[in-house]
Image: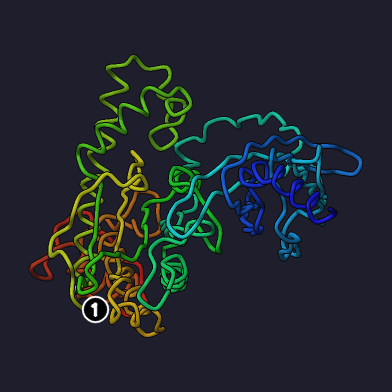
Amino acid sequence: MRNLWIAILLFISLPALAGQAEVVGVRLWPAPDHTRLVFDLSGPADHSLFTLPDPDRIVIDLKNTGLRKELVTDLSNGPVKSIRSGGRNGTDLRIVLDTKSTMRPKSFILKPYGEYGDRLVLDLYHVKGKKHKVVKSARPTAKKQAKAKLRDVVIAIDAGHGGEDPGARGYRGTREKHVVLAIARRLKALVEKEPGMRPVMIRDGDYYISLRGRVKKARQKRADIFISIHADAFRNKKAKGSSVYTLSPRGATSEAARWLAESENKADLIGGVSLDDKDDLLASVLLDLSQTASLEASLDVADHILGGLKRVGKVHKHRVQSASFMVLKSPDIPSVLVETAFISNPEEERKLLTRSYQKKLAKALMQGVRKYFHRFPPPGTRLARRHVIQSGDTLSAIAQQYQVPVTRLRNINQLSGDSVKVGEVLQIPVQTSDS
């Protein structure tokens, strides 16, 4: 009789259990500006959350959800002290995050994709203090500007994917996010050694940054170029070689319309110049001029980078390609996307994991960047040194004065010989390690 009652109770509870999702695990991804927690679910689930003070807590309620096993993850590098959980209302699950300080949470549900099932994503942001009003100083005079210190050229290095987004997977299971970060760090080291240049890493760890967030960060750092590093993949494992992309004209047109339509973009659009006080026609013309210049510069940089990659190994496409990749859509920063190799090709996957090949790829990227900026140095940078020819000047004397080889002085100014004319302006290259 007892067994019969147990069977009846189990039968009654089956419909509820069959439709109940479970939390099967949790992962944490610390990033510089926020921390992401990902709760893996066995199926879709509705949720709500709220915060509590003294002590600081974040409470997550999941409807019709259970817990498969205890939630365990490394919390040493994030703002969460502990994770607690318990049943609620007989069918629901409550998860409590004890935090080290007051956090501002944002949450959303992700549907199954690739190797992942349903997920609840929680982004935790530190609550900043009130912003103080910044009093802008008076505009510097021309005399002060002349004395202003020359700045370095800023190279924004973007390692694709990261965190919850692993990118492509190789034949041996290699993750794209890991190899491109390794290449990006090697490129960063080369840029740090390059006189007149300074690197900015868009992603310098295993965490997620949105595509528009990557572009935004590059613009905040006032980058002179944006290089996004990836590893290609294709269903045919024989596909191999590098490719370089710039923004397609169609992608540029659609993005221009979006930027002009959004007031927050118009307030700080072209190199920090506001367009919100311009009429629509003038704003459109200014943006078009900026985009045209950026696209032309992007193509030039991409050509130099592709040339360097051709010396490293096989290229998949012998010409620079164009596409509407989101990370290429900054209107005022020349931007290129480099597919370093096919991670889906077993041979290239193996190469991508080696230090020697990563160094070769980084060196090829560096050579392309160097060649471009030595030809077209941005005004106000250390690479944009100028010398006005005076009476009695000779090319060899100028080279000695600035401690650069005559050949480099000749090449960068596209001189066929050593003769110079009074009043002519020469660009003075910065001394490099390979000079």
Q: What's the coloring here? A: rainbow
Residue 164, position as x, y percentages in the image: 53, 56
Q: Most extreme residue toward the front, as rendered?
A: 1
Tally of numbered discs: 1
Residue 53, position as x, y percentages in the image: 87, 38
Name the quarter where the C terminus is drawn: bottom left
Left or right position of 211 against 296: right
The residue at 65%/29% (across/down) is 135
The residue at 65%/52% (across/down) is 37
Q: Is residue 157 visible?
A: no
Residue 242, position as x, y percentages in the image: 23, 68
How many residues crowd mark 1 within 10 Å: few (<14), some (14–19), many (20+)? some
The residue at 70%/34% (across/down) is 48
Q: Is residue 94 visible?
A: yes
Q: Amino acid at mark 1?
A: Val
Q: Most extreme residue toward the left, as rendered?
A: 416
Q: Secondary structure at mark 1?
A: helix
Identify the image quadrant of residue 78: bottom right
Identify the image quadrant of residue 399: bottom left
Q: Most extreme residue toward the right, as rendered?
A: 54
Identify the image quadrant of residue 360: bottom left
Left or right position of 269 against 308: right
The residue closer to the viewer here, 344 or 403, is 344
Residue indicated by mark 1 = 312
Above or below, comparing residue 147 to residue 165 in the picture: above
The residue closer to the viewer here, 267 or 423, is 267
The residue closer to the viewer here, 388 or 348, is 348
Residue 213, position as x, y percentages in the image: 49, 44
The residue at 27%/17% (across/down) is 281
Above or below, comparing residue 373 to residue 97 in the picture: below
